[in-house]
Amino acid sequence: MKKKIKILIVDDEYAFCRSLKIFFDKIGFQALIATNGEHALDIVREEKPAIMTLDIRMPGFNGYDILQKVKRLDPDLFIIVVTAIDVPNMEEMLEHSGAHALLHKPIDLQKLSDTLYGFVGHLL
């Protein structure tokens, strides 16, 4: 049996996490959920996911904080920022922080899927 690629969903909205988990599981990934920054860091340390989706606006550690800490733990982690925030130059700021892609909520599942499979080819 082929090992599934782990993807970590980090968002403080549990319902959003659940819906993404169902989508990722359905298309063949092993989806994990973290609803706060500390939990996300623990999962990165313990489970070593290859991919992470990350919300920016969360209580406690915000997405930028998590991004910096995660990149120190695993510089190769592929990070897709998924957010409702739309500020000028956000994509550039995130790229400098180590994110690989930016998608806006409400999420376009086709764009998300295309982004994932564009990266997954490097893992196979």
Image (cartoon, helix red, strand yellow):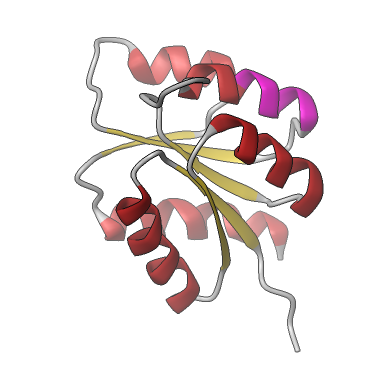
For the point 73% across and 37% down, the residue is 76
Q: Nearer the viewer, residue 11 or 81?
A: 11
- For the stretch drawn in magenta, what is the main secondary structure? helix
Please determine whether, in this image, residue 10 is positioned above or below residue 2.
above
Residue 40, image x, y percentages: 61, 39
| Image x and y of residue 18, in percent | 38, 61
Image point (68%, 51%), residue name: 50
* Of 24 and 42, the residue lying toward us: 42
- Residue at 38% x, 21% y: name it: 91
Q: Front-most of 120 and 87?
A: 87
**Horizontal relation, residue 47 to residue 60: left or right:** right
Rendered location of residue 80, percent (x, y): 47, 39
For the record, the magenta segment spans 68-73
Quarter holding the N terminus?
bottom right
Q: Residue at x 38, y 69 (%)?
A: 23
- 55 within the magenta span: no
